[in-house]
Amino acid sequence: MEKVSVIFVNYNSGRFLAESVLNLKSLSDELEIIVIDNGSSDRSADYLRADSNVNLICVGENVGFGSAANIGAKIAAGKYLLFLNPDAFPLPGTVAKMASHLDLAPGCGACGAFIVDFQGREQNGGRRCDPNLVRSLGKVVSSVLTKLRLPTFDLTLEPLPTLPTPVDAVSGSCMMVRAEVHHDIGGFDEAYFLHFEDLDYCRRTRDAGWGVDFLPTAPTFHYQGGSVGISRTIMAKHKQASLRRYLRKFSRSTPIVLNLQMFILLIFERLGLLMFRIGQRMESETDGVTSGIAQFRRLICGDQPVVLIMGGRSEIGVPLCGRLNAVGIAVVSVSRCERQAVVFPGTSVVHPELFKRNVGANRLNIIGIVSLCPIWELQAYEQSFAALGCDQIPWIVFSSTSVLTRESEISSDPTGTVAQLKSGEEWLIARRRLSESRTLLVRPTVIYGGKYNNNVNLIKQIGKYSRLSPQLNFALGSRCPVHADDLAEWIVALLQIYTGDRNAGMTTAEIQGGEVLTFKEMVSRTSRSSGLTIRAMSLSRNIFRVALGLVGRIPFLAKMPPKLIERLEHDFVFDNREAQAQAPTSMRFFHP
């Protein structure tokens, strides 16, 4: 690909620049790499002075993105120019696909990659329509009130196409253009210091008679915000100034109407900036991230073997991530709430969209799957599992003993939790019947010890604040609760056995803890676990039934399982031998 010149504009990008350059070199040794350093104070580009394969130009001051990009374009020798941010990582094949598209589409002047963030979600800006006042107002408001669905110039919420698609604009974080087009339109408008220069560039490219295409099969991961030294407030101000310049430059309105539009936009911008500042911390957005960039680069390219944990933010998932990392196993954890996940140095958190919607950007090298999410949700990932070759790796999938203890509920509630558990297990058995590796279906009993165990934690809170311990004298059914960390330790042992085992087959195992006790004793120990002086409060069967009836009338509380009182009187203790046969583990006594 000698015909491609890659142009970086660097400003205090830290380790991002080094890893992005390294990523490019791993893709091809025929790329011309040009780095324009905009007066970085972190010396992030200094190491390139000794690299004869990279053309480093140090400007000495921050002249803005457009000006620096134009400097790079002037010295580039390639037929095609790839403008790439230092915190952007094209996957293998992406650069070649972009160049091939320009080869095969003579009317296309610029094309953009499929941009996903570091959690695997499509990033705003990768495909856009031209901004106007209404779309700009929608963009400003929705950037603050993120749950609102207002019209903006981003097309992220539109269905993801499967073929190259003409759009008004693509993202300048990974945009390839014909060198002749760049020079014909005069390059980037240097009056934009930061933001909107790519929108302006694409519009002028189209005005010159060329097409702009979005390539959904050319994925690139983009951190967005890899440069330090500019506060978020200053960044927001640059974005607002660039938006106003863009609208003034391309508006067809009369001066009076245009000034009125600018006044309305200014009001919304000031309101948005005020709300943006509330609770803002003036710190680098890359804190806590740069140390893991090298690992992330290897991971997204498939060079780093990983264990995939579905539901890594669960009560078992949190200790499991830590334990796997402790024995040197890298983890990818799937969670909808990735910002709330516990951070471990060897664990990367991704959004389910990477497996459901953005499968084309998923190149993970998965060596084992542990599913801790509701088992019926797995079917939605079937396409990506097949594409990633997951039939040849071991699966450990958690269901629940409720399939056994509450099976009678299925007929009366065919769409309830138990019916969904049963359906999920049936799908798993059918899906993995012909698998070339191990499959273990796990049905745990009562799990405790995790942050998200609402029942145990609620009883703890009642004891802590009321100083009362409910004594359920009728709840004499036996239980054998298992600690979440014990399950995590057991899973690690299983994976170490399974990943080196060529045997196949499906096994089902119930698993429980190290101590059998009554439900009454469980509640008593849990409520007293605060260490405070607690008074016993005796509750008979009838009083408890009345209390349940009152609680069940509260709309926002979870629905109580039917026949709950009867269940508390029955024994639910299971045979632990199959679980121990898979991986012998010592389980602790019940200590909430």
Image (cartoon, rainbow, N blue to C red):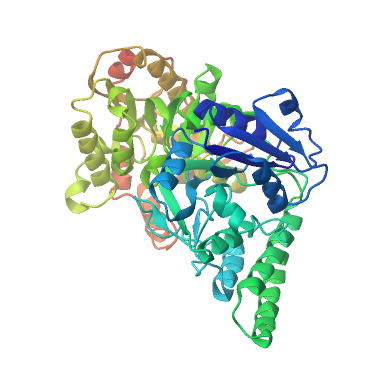
**Between 392 and 534, the one nearer to me in the picture:** 392
Above or below: residue 564 compared with residue 205: above
Q: Is residue 519 visible?
A: yes
| Residue at 50%, 65% in the rendered image | 129
Image-quadrant location for residue 297: top right
Residue 327 is left or right of residue 432, and the answer is: right
Above or below: residue 172 compared with residue 485: below
x, y percent for residue 2: 52, 33
x, y percent for residue 511: 34, 24
x, y percent for residue 429: 21, 31
Residue 92 is left or right of residue 46, and the answer is: left
Residue 543 is left or right of residue 195, and the answer is: left
Image-quadrant location for residue 476: top left
Q: Is residue 592 visible?
A: no
**Between 401 and 11, the one nearer to me in the picture:** 11
Badge count: 0
| Residue at 49%, 20% in the rendered image | 329
**Between 52 and 540, the one nearer to me in the picture:** 52
x, y percent for residue 441: 28, 28
| Residue at 59%, 48% in the rendered image | 466
**Between 107 and 592, the one nearer to me in the picture:** 107
| Residue at 75%, 57% in the rendered image | 233
Residue 586 is left or right of residue 284, and the answer is: left
In the rendered image, the residue lying farthest to the left is 411
